[in-house]
Amino acid sequence: MALAAQIQPGEEQRQAAVEVAESLRYGHYADTAIDDDWSRLAFERYLDILDGQRAFLLESDVEEFRHLETRIDDMLFEGELEPAYQLYQRYHDRAENRFEWLLDTLDEGLNFTYETDMRLDLDRRDADWATSEAELEELWRKRLKNDALTLDISGQDEEQVENNLRQRYEGQLTRLRQTNGEDVFGLFMAAVTSSIDPHTEYLSPRQGESFDIQMRLSLEGIGAMLQSDGEYVKVTSLVPGGPADRAGVLEPADRIVGVGQEDEEKTVNVVGMRLDEVVDLIRGPKGTVVRLDVVPAEAVDMTRSHTVEITRDTVDLEDQAAHGEVIEVERDDGVKRIGVITIPTFYVDFDAWQAGAEEFRSTTRDVAREVERLKGEGVDGIMLDLRNNGGGALQEANSLLGLFIDRGPTVQVRDARGRISLYGDTETGTLYDGPLAVLVNRLSASASEIFAGAIQDYGRGLVLGSATFGKGTVQTLNDLSHGQIKLTRAKFYRISGESTQNRGVEPDILFPDMVDPERIGESSLDNALAWDTVQAVQYRHYGEPWEYLETLRSRHRERAESHPNFVYLKERVELARRMREEHTSVSLDRERRQREVESRDAEQLALENRRRKALGLEPLDELIDARSEAGEEETERDEPVDRVQVTEAAAILADYAELTERRLAGRY
């Protein structure tokens, strides 16, 4: 089906392209010259978006369009989009022919024996382009065999395998044939914008209308942030208090390979499906159930999928409100009581606030109430748990800091012209001046990083956990004549002058984290802006936590080396890293593939069972039970693995409180 005559840019796309180019040249934070050098980056990015696995286009196709390498800048400013559409058309024709070939092959019958020495490379992003149709056909025979073997090993019979593969390829072919000029423009603009930074993007009119829903699924969805990861859709984070978070069946870096509805027996295979189409399948009315086929983050083979069910719901402010508890830490001289306040997000009821209401919900107000309550209970220290807190209202990070310091700066914001604005707490006095700690992880981002960095810079308390996300940029959403552009306009800097961008905040004492930084976080994104510094501002120190770090780290190591869950976390991180490095290809021999999968499963199961044995729990028979069993055994011994991060952070804060108390008494 030739679409060359149908897929053409319209005047609205031509004008939008010019406006995008002007926005990038004059409005983006990075001083990027939209010139021939940039054009080369955008050209390669376009190829990556069209055919990132080097599976459809030939080397000769790429060379035929190589002249665009230095022309994309001119094409944008002149609204000349035809060459970009022609390159898409070449990809389209190759892909259409390939899916037709796959369906023809299925019609002939697979008849695979799965006895071979062949292996399939899992990641071909850096592979050379194929030089011939025969080379591509050999690659696709391997891919087809791998797709069939993956389903076969998961327990499907030959008829089910063929039906599932037919559904997958027919779906991909149908979606390909439905591509229109707006879709092609979106792909090209994605290459243009993401060649500068990963948070700058063009939104079509349709995307702009449902921007928040598509990105967060928070309105009558499951409450998860998703992104494309090659052919798969990956979970990047969960909305605190949302349906997926409450259900406990999804984790960051899980991959969704199928979506089904409660009233339909069939599950739609979403491998290779566009992100917005997967989002549309997952969204639905409140109270209905969605079925997801999920490959866990820790699985290194796509055969290890399982099905979970989540009831769609809305996310209420109450579900995301800050809440506190007291953890008792046993010590030789008695019990230390540590107050822990969990802050899922930085929120404020903007409508009530703007209306001048005296009473309105906000992070700072809710935390202040918890602090007063904990002070009344005579706690020895307070810890703020910002793990998985993706940010929110910047003003709340400023005012929250004001509860723990006298007035002073919180963050510097540098705009595209180099002008620096200073934001901070303007209220005199503090609510709490005792021992303080902040617990963070890889999913602590944006406002969370600003707050944690300020606590660290002021010497006001300890920062514990793992390095944060590294989201240190600010975006604005600007209307175009056709669609919108989300543009990176500014960058956050700590009062010390260091950016939070890319590197995030480095804790004073590091904990192992189950979230893989190679797959989640700013540094894992292509073309992320670099870390840098500006001049520090003047600020006072409220303490010198760094003077106690050697002792605190020593005590922490002693506890961590003997706690089963801490040992497990450390070993699991190392095992995941090793498996990722070793698992670069899969065998197309059934027995060898089965052995490889079973060997990896056995390693992970043995690790889990060593943890369980040390805790006095019954061992598991299957790896897939590791997630579900933890939720069923509501026992103190088998609390969630990452709960040890909270209890150990409380122990460190108890140590810190003791050491500072000794110093004040002249005994340190």
Image: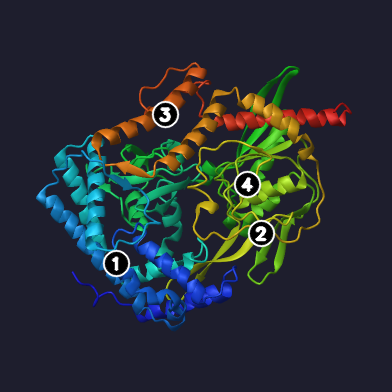
**Most extreme residue toward the left, as rendered?**
108
Q: Position of residue 211 (x, y in %)?
A: 44, 60
Q: Position of residue 371 (x, y in %)?
A: 70, 37
Q: Amino acid at mark 2?
A: Asp
Q: Position of residue 414 (x, y in %)?
A: 67, 64
The tag earlier along the polypeptide, 1 or 2, is: 1
Q: Where, quadrant-wise, is the C terminus in this rendering?
A: top right
Number of other residues with Cα within 10 Å of mark 4, as a class: few under 14, some 14 to 19, many 20 or more: many
Residue named by callout 2: 532
Q: Amino acid at mark 1?
A: Tyr
Residue named by callout 3: 603
Callouts 1 and 2 close, C-beta under 8 Å: no
Left or right placement of residue 130 versus residue 532 in this view:
left
Left or right placement of residue 363 versus residue 335 in this view:
left
**Most extreme residue toward the bottom, as rendered?**
78
The tag earlier along the polypeptide, 4 or 3, is: 4
Instruction: Give 512 or 627, whichever is nearer the viewer.
Output: 512
The tag earlier along the polypeptide, 2 or 3, is: 2
Residue named by callout 1: 91
Callouts 2 and 3 close, C-beta under 8 Å: no
Q: CA distance from mark 4 to mark 1?
A: 49 Å
The tag earlier along the polypeptide, 2 or 4, is: 4
Q: CA distance from mark 2 to mark 3?
A: 41 Å
